[in-house]
Amino acid sequence: MGMRMKAFFGKNIALRREIMINDHLLARGIRDQAVLKAMREVPREAFVAAGMEELAYEDHPLPIGEGQTISQPYMVAYMAESLELSPADRVLEIGTGSGYAAAVLSRIVDTVRTVERIAVLVENARKRLEMLGYTNVHVLEGDGTLGWPEHAPYDAIVVTAGAPDLPRPLLMQLSVGGRLVIPVGATPYLQMLVRVRRVGEGEYRSEDLFPVRFVPLIGAAGWRESHEAG
Ligand code: SAH
């Protein structure tokens, strides 16, 4: 690549986003058209820390402050696809972080609710989502292991932090037919991504998707505070 071409490439965010779609999502099997469209629409560079915009379309998690990270694009797309979403689904996310995954989900369904326990991240995510016009995302500050009972039941719940077990409140807040996608593991930083389907009032079916590495889910039905990094 010549110098001029390189300079052009360095600045061209739209091109980088398209490469992300092709090399990281399509090439690795993401097929849900609504998910791919959403990933094309949401500017990931607006959700990473200042100075990291250049890295926004690499397929890596990035720090967002407070010892937390924005998930890698593939993981966001994979989790969204695993939720098997339809436009009218009521969706709950636990672990707002930067707000990126919530923004992606908000392009697929009418309303997204998301819970984050760290106040600074809540504040930043709210500002960012408002600035970018994602008015159908509602952010709550609190312990997401308890869900958001006021708006239950949900057709889809996604947890973007690693839990020691399936949080009972989240199982209770699933609609019949609803899906919960959540990393579960016996250690705070290594998990199996699991999809749980509520197939009847008191009947759930669980399947393992693949091994993942998320920051710990900290709360009443999660890990204790002492497992927090940094
Ligand atoms: N979905 C985010 C990535 C979040 S990283 C994004 O797209 O940027 C996981 C987040 O889960 C962190 O911000 C962490 O603070 C949060 N978290 C951990 N335990 C939580 C809990 N019990 N309730 C709500 N949020 C929690």
Image (cartoon, grey):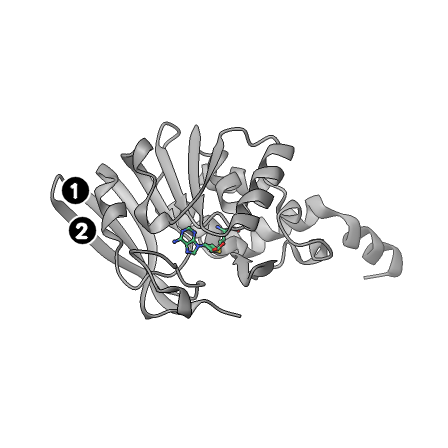
Kind of residue at disc 1: Val
Expressed as whole percent of the image width and height from the top left, the position of residue 138 reads 47, 34
Mark count: 2
Expressed as whole percent of the image width and height from the top left, the position of residue 90 reads 35, 32
Label 2 beta carbon less than 8 Å to ligand 1: no
Please say if 21 is above or below 151.
Answer: below
Q: How crowded is mark 1: few (under 14 residues within 10 Å), some or many (20 or more)?
A: some
The mark found on residue 205 in the picture is 2
Say left or right for 8 vs 192: right
Please say if 54 is above or below 14.
Answer: below
Say left or right for 60 vs 186: right
Distance from label 2 to label 1 (Cα)? 7 Å
User: In the depicted view, which residue is nearer to us: 206 or 230?
Assistant: 230
Residue ID at (36%, 32%): 86
Label 1: state its secondary structure. Answer: strand
Kind of residue at disc 2: Arg
Please say if 185 is above or below 55.
Answer: below
User: In the depicted view, which residue is nearer to us: 63 or 80?
Assistant: 63
Q: Do the residues labelled 2 and 1 touch (CB within 8 Å)?
A: yes
Q: Earlier in the sequence, mark 2 or mark 1?
A: 1
User: In the depicted view, which residue is nearer to us: 39 or 187?
Assistant: 187
Quarter of the image for residue 224 reads bottom left
Expressed as whole percent of the image width and height from the top left, the position of residue 17 reads 64, 48
Quarter of the image for residue 153 reads top left
Residue ID at (24%, 56%): 207
Residue ID at (73%, 57%): 51
Disc 1 target residue: 199
**Residue 49 visible in image:** yes
Please say if 28 is above or below 44.
Answer: below
